[in-house]
Image (cartoon, grey):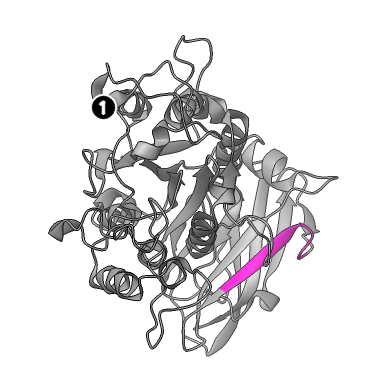
Amino acid sequence: MSSDLKKTPRAFGLALTLCATALFGCQTFEMEKVEPKAVAAEQVDIAVQGKMDKSLITLVIDKSGSMLYGVADPNGSCRNDAEALGYDRAGDCRWNSLLDVFVGAADGSSEGFLRKSQQMNDGKGSALFGLATYPVGAACDSGNVDVQLSETDDNVEQIINALTAIKPAGGTPTAPTLNNLLLQDALLNTETKTRQRFVMLLTDGSPNCNASQANKERCDACNADNTAEGCNDLTSLIPDTDLMRCYPTNSAYIAGQGTTCDLGQHPDLYGTDCLDMDHTVEAIEALRAKGVDTFVIGFGNTGDDPATRLTLNAAAIAGGHPVGENGDDIRFYEATNTDTLAAALEEILNAATGCSFQLDPLPSSCADVQINLVTTATQEVRTLVLNQEWTCEETRDDAGNLTNVTVTILDTETDKICTDRLMESATGTYELKFIYQVTL
C-alpha cells in the first residue's frame, strides 16, 4: 500500500507512523519541522491505494495423542497398530479431519484452507504462514517451529508437507510451546511495522505437560488431600494458597486408585498432568505484549469439558480476539466438525485481514478522532459515523496512560466501506483522513 501525506501548517518535527493491521501496512512520513506547541490539531491523510500488505500468521497446532480420537466420538477410529505410532490416515478422527480442512482431502478431491488462502487478493495471497506443532516426539517436550515464518516467502507447500508427515502422539504442552514463540525473530519483528502478526492456536483439549513449581505444588496438594473433590474442583482454590486445584487432564483423580496428576510419578514429569491454564494464559499475554494477538480454536468436543472450556475461554480473551459477549459460555472459536472448522478458519482470516489502523502519534482519546472518507476523483468528503461505520478501542497501562488506539472501519448493510471501497477498489480511488488532537 502506498500513501501520500499532505503537510499542514501545524506539522512538527517527528516521523509520523499510521499502522494498519493485517493487510493494511503502516506508513511512515517525515514531517516538516516547526516551532513546537503544547497541543495541536493534526490532520493525517492516508491515501489508500491498491492491495494491502499480507498478515503474518504462525499456526500453532496440537498434535497430541488425543487427536487420534473421533471428532465427536472419544473412542476414535484412527488407531492402527500396524502403522507408525498406531496412526492411519484413512481413519475418521480429529487429525485426519484437520488435514482435510487445512491441506485438502487425502484423495485430492478438495483443496484445503492453506492453498485457498493463497488464491485470495487477486492470487497474491492474504497472509504468510509459519507452523509450530506440539509436542515433540511422544511425550511432553514443547513444540518445534516446523516451518519458519517469512516476510517474503510463501511457505504453504512446506507447511502442507510438514502436516501430512505428522503422526499424532503425546501430551499437550501448550504453554511451553507458546513461550518458545517468544524466541522467534520473524514473529516478533517490530522494526518492520508494515505487517501485523498473529498466532492461530488450534487444540483439542486441556493444556498440560508443564512441570513448573506451581504445578508440582498443586499435584502435592491433590495427593495429600486424597479426595476427588480436593483434586478435581475447578470452582475453588487450594486452601491457604492462590493456586487452582490440579484437575488432572488425562483422567479424574479417584481416591484409592493411585495418583493421576503425576503421570506415573516419573521425576521429570511430576505435576505435568495438572491443568496448565494459568501458564497458557500468561504465555498468550506475553505474546500480546510483543504485538502478537492470538486466535484460539477448540476442535472436537472442547466445549463439553469444563476444564477445557474454562481454559480456552481465558486464552481467547487474553489473545484479544474472543467471540461472543461477556458472560457467554464459549468465547473461543468452537469447531465440532470439518464444516465448522473451515468456517472458523475463514472467519479468523477475515478478522486478521480487515480494515483496522493503529494511530501513531496517539490522539488524546477516541472521542477526539474524526475520520473522513474522500472520493479522490470528485473530492467528495464523507464523515464516517462512530459506532456505525467505524469503532475505536483504547488500550491503557496499569497507570491509566493511553498506550494504543485502534480504529476499525466497518462494513454496513448499505455500504461495504472496508471490503468494497478500501480493499477492493482501484488504486487511488479513496483516501481516509484522520483528524484529531495530539500532544506535541
Q: Which residue is located at x 41 percent, y 84 percent?
A: 239
Q: Which residue is located at x 80 percent, y 49 percent?
A: 412
Q: For the view shown, which residue lies furthest in the right direction?
A: 414
Q: Which residue is located at x 50 percent, y 35 percent?
A: 126
Position in image of residue 411 (x %, y %): 74, 48
Check the image and report above or below for 10 versus 56: below
Tell me the magenta residue range.
Answer: 386-394
Question: Is 24 left, or right, of 250 in this rendering?
Answer: right
Q: Is residue 23 visible?
A: no
Position in image of residue 181 (x %, y %): 29, 53
In which quadrant of the rendered view does residue 82 lie?
A: top left
Give the crowd class for mark 1: few <14, some 14-19, many >=20 residues within 10 Å: some
Check the image and report above or below for 220 versus 169: below
**Tag count in the figure?**
1
In which quadrant of the rendered view does residue 44 lie?
A: bottom right
**Observer-nearest of 4 and 266:** 266
Q: Which residue is located at x 38 percent, y 50 percent?
A: 250
- Callout 1 amino acid: Leu
Position in image of residue 24 (x %, y %): 53, 48
* Disc 1: which residue: 85
**Observer-nearest of 143 and 259:** 259
